[in-house]
Amino acid sequence: MTPSDWDRLTDQLPAWLESSRKESHKGRPASYIPELAHAQGDALGIVLLTGEGKEISAGDAGLTFTMQSISKVFTLMLALIDHGEEGVFRKVGMEPTGDDFNSMLKLELVEPGIPFNPLINAGAIAISSLIRGDRPAEKVERILSFFRLLTGDPNLAYNEAVYHSESATAHRNRSLAYFLKDNRVLEEADDVEEVLDVYFKHCSVDVNCRHLARMALVLALNGKDPDSGALLVPRRYVQIAKTFMLSCGMYNASGEFALQVGLPAKSGVAGGILTLVPGQCGIGVVGPALNDKGNSIAGVHLLRTLSETFDWSMF
């Protein structure tokens, strides 16, 4: 990003954000996890971080929310670190589904009966079973340690209220997990409820926009820590994660987002969006009002504005 682009971004970002905030009335916060329904529907915040240490924030950037599906990008990378590509892709595929993120349709209809990719719920449950650790608590602690490393925040933790709300209402996810068990995607030794406990907790990790921007910046820098330059994640595993973000990261609107914004991204139903401009910056957005695809309606609008203005699309 040129100095003049950065100056323009600094100057105009608050106005662009307020314009996008007006889109919030077209959506509403997620309610299928009851605790998420309490979110402020017209909230919108953003943080951008560059590899040179520059930072811009606007709007409700300090708002705390849970990662939800955004966490799946990083548990995927941790599973790859633990098992390598062969071990991970025996359990999950590499293709978009075209179905809802919590669908089990293709598990039954398409051989070999493994989840199509690691970013849908079934795939992320399978990935959660691969995180090394003797007990669920040990697996959760390893995930939190990894997330803390990437965010630079040693105090990162999961939200107890959201975790319990998610666990109590997760009938579809339990169905998916037991289906995976029947299909032998989950191993004989895998206790379904223990795998789900790990899954619910990593989805319930509390973050803000800066946390997401810092994690995204590590991806933008191909796995390197922006402060020390140390390699935190092997470049190949970052490449895999970013490819899935581009093809599957925005649920059934991933193709539309690729056309309109053209950046790797992952959304979550608490309203977060993690995205990046390769080699340049990491971006964290929150806007709890969702569209019918489960993505932040104002957040997508703001990212499209920025991408079009600064010609950020990869294509």
Image (spheres, grey):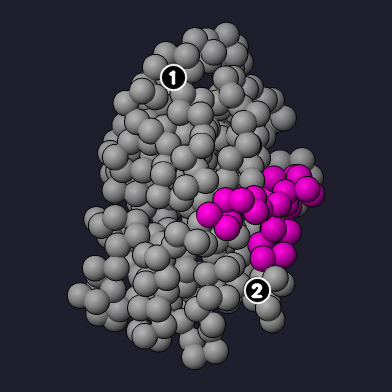
Q: Is residue 155 left or right of residue 283?
A: right
Q: Residues within 10 Å of mark 2 (few under 14, many from 20)?
A: many
Instruction: Return the disc, 1 or 2, that comes first in the chain's sequence.
Output: 1
Residue furthest left as drawn? 109
Q: Residue at x 45, y 28 (%)?
A: 41
Q: In the depicted view, which residue is nearer to us: 33 or 228?
A: 33
Q: In the depicted view, which residue is nearer to us: 284 or 315?
A: 284
Residue furthest bottom as drawn? 188
Residue under circle 1? 21
Q: Chief secondary structure of the magenta span?
A: helix
Residue 137 on the magenta segment: no
What kind of element bears circle 2? helix
Provide residue 153's location: percent of width, then percent of height: 76, 45
Q: Is residue 109 left or right of residue 27?
A: left
Residue under circle 2? 136
Q: In the depicted view, which residue is nearer to us: 225 or 300?
A: 300
Provide residue 95's location: percent of width, then percent of height: 32, 62
What's the residue type where badge 2 is placed?
Pro
What's the residue type where badge 1 is placed?
Arg
Q: Residue at x 35, y 78 (%)?
A: 179
Q: Which mark is residue 164?
A: none
Q: Residues within 10 Å of mark 1 (few under 14, many from 20)?
A: many
**What's the magenta region?**
140-165
The answer, for residue 51, to whether it is visible in the render is yes
Residue 154 on the magenta segment: yes
Q: CA distance from mark 1 to mark 2?
A: 39 Å
